[in-house]
Amino acid sequence: MVSSSLSIHLLFLAFFLLLLFTPSLSHGHTYDPLNSKPVITHHGGPLLTGTLNLALIWYGNCGRVQKSTIRNFIKSLNNEGSRTSLQPQVSSWWQVVESYQSAVPRAVTHGGHRSPKIIVQVAKQFSDRSYKYGKILTTVDLIPKLVHDYTNGDPHLIPIIVTARDVTVQGLCTRKCADHGVVDNKPYIVVGNPETECPGACGWPFHQADNGPKGMVLHPPNLNLAADAMVIALATALADTVTNPLNTGFYLEIQMNPLGPGSVCQGIFGTGAFPGNPGKVHIDPTTGGGFNAHGNKGKKFLLPAIWNPKTSSCWTLM
């Protein structure tokens, strides 16, 4: 009887420790991509196709390295390089996003060929060093005003708000590291800077995570934690926005909180990923930075896993 009671006690203790040390890979989401199989479906709405004209809005005193790193990432999306280019390329990751065009029910097939290209280009840039709307941006009030202010209602622009380290964005850090929404039936993206406010939530794997096992920490490939973490966040939000621009596209329904193809695979950067370990990545022999993609002007990036509609699983470049 004593032995039986002891066994039950140890079983409960083991279960408690398992809960305690299981990381929140999705920054507040209750979905675990490592132990669950997502089912992302199309909900009848449009996707973004053709040419995406981005309006980059640098809100606050954004750093030079952060600006150049984000711009180079965007330029890398359609830069396929040559057969002799270093692999893998950022454009290979983007091709998975493009493949969602063929995953729409009753979509026109392309004879086994890849889906049409989605061209991404920076059409306009704005800088607001005056913090016109303050240092706390709310999604219901201030972000729509900011979007209106800089796009003037232009339906052909997709605003991407990139914030400085001393700006707080409602909903970021606690639940996600970037967000996308709709203003006047037009999508927008906002990317937060985790350097000061939440490096342990949105800086991993370049900073020790707040929750879960204290495992491997990588050096950022561009030697700037904020810049490289913001590329991961932007890549996630961009994939979600293209495939679900008006909240009627591709997403996983989970507790009234839809997760897109990027968000559903958070915490995975390479094959073999597990809690506390991002998975297989390259290590730059010169800088020591961890990366999995080559891009524009020889730049290197660490890109997140994305849900591949062809394999119905989280897919990584390595």
Image: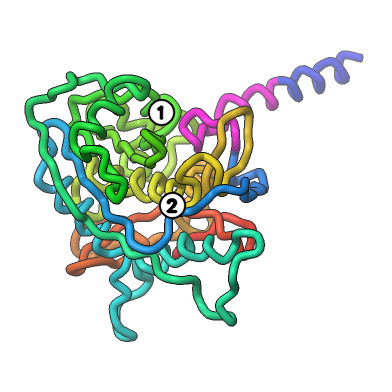
Q: From the viewer's perspective, is residue 225 above or below residue 199?
A: below
Q: Looking at the picture, which amino acid does disc 1 mark? A: Asp
What residue is drawn where x is 49% and y is 43%?
263
Would you say 93 lies left or right of 123 here? right
The reply to whether residue 219 is visible in this rendering is no
Work out which residue is located at the far bottom of the displayed protein and give it: 83
The label number, if any, that marks residue 242 in the structure image: 2
Q: On the rendered structure, is 132 left or right of 203?
A: left
The percent position of residue 42, horizontal first and vertical second, equals 62, 50
Q: Is residue 273 magenta?
A: no
The residue indicated by pointer 1 is 210
Q: Which residues are magenta?
A: 13-31
> Which marked residue is nearer to the observer: mark 1 or mark 2?
2
Location of residue 310 by image quarter: bottom right
Residue 258 vs residue 283, the one in the foreground: 258
How far across and how far down the image is residue 128, in percent?
11, 33
Q: Is residue 12 above or below residue 316?
A: above
- Residue at horizontal 45 percent and vertical 64 percent from the top: 317
Q: Amino acid at mark 2?
A: Val
